[in-house]
Amino acid sequence: MSGSRIARRIRTVAALAAVVTVLGATSAHAQQQAIDPTWLSFDAAARSARFQLIAGLTGLNGALNFNGFSDGSLTFVVPVGWQTEIDFRNHDGMLPHSAEVIAPQTPLPIQPVAPAIPRAFTLRLAEGLISEATDTMGFTAQPAGDYLIFCGVPGHGAAGMWIRFQVSASAKVPALLLTPAPGKR
């Protein structure tokens, strides 16, 4: 094989690799779920918030996601002292999932830990709930601080199945916010 044919093949392979890389990045970005405003409802007068937490909503991160978000890329904010209900549903057709509010920690735990807020956890934390099973976490959002909503099924949370939960002393109403990845703020 001549040197020019080898050089051409190397350029072709490099070009194909670049296309695959761009398509892979585009595909991963396209999988990023938009915030659906129907996931959050609240009554400011009653100081109550309700959030629809959906495990495995999309294929992002091998379906190890909440509402199509993983690795803390979504933040649920609630004013301190508000009555909070998190309606959990496992949409993943293959794997069981659970949820609990935990204190942020590094490294992330590989199994369930004690919840950071009383009653802020689903049934069957380690075993998870089967496909389309539901549960509701009802609790008072306190104390103020930063937390994680974390899947307690062994390995899931550590693999990125967590979003942020903030109990805010300054927020007037609940909100769902996109959270930039560390270093991309």
Image (spheres, rainbow, N blue to C red):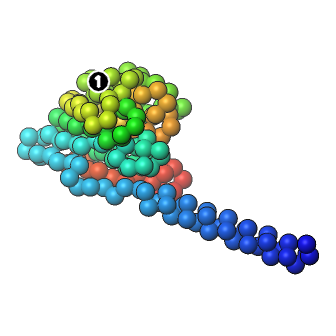
Q: Nearer the viewer, residue 60 or 142?
A: 60
Q: Is residue 80 visible?
A: no
Please give the residue where the numbered disc 1 appears in the rendered image: 123
Q: Nearer the viewer, residue 63 or 180?
A: 63
Q: Position of residue 98 (x, y in %)?
A: 35, 30
Q: Residue at x 50, y 37 (%)?
A: 159
Q: Position of residue 153 (x, y in %)?
A: 42, 28
Q: Quadrant of residue 122?
A: top left
Residue farthest toward the bottom in the current orientation of the protein: 4
Residue farthest toward the left in the current orientation of the protein: 45
| Relative to 67, 8 lies left or right | right
Position of the N terminus by quadrant? bottom right
Q: How many marks?
A: 1
Q: Nearer the viewer, residue 167 or 130?
A: 130
Q: Residue at x 43, y 41 (%)?
A: 64
Q: Residue at x 43, y 57 (%)?
A: 31
Q: Quadrant of residue 86?
A: top left
Tell me if residue 20 comes above or below residue 179 in the rendering. below
Tell me the SS state at disc 1: loop
Tell me if residue 65 comes above or below residue 134 in the rendering. below
| Relative to 32, 78 lies left or right | left
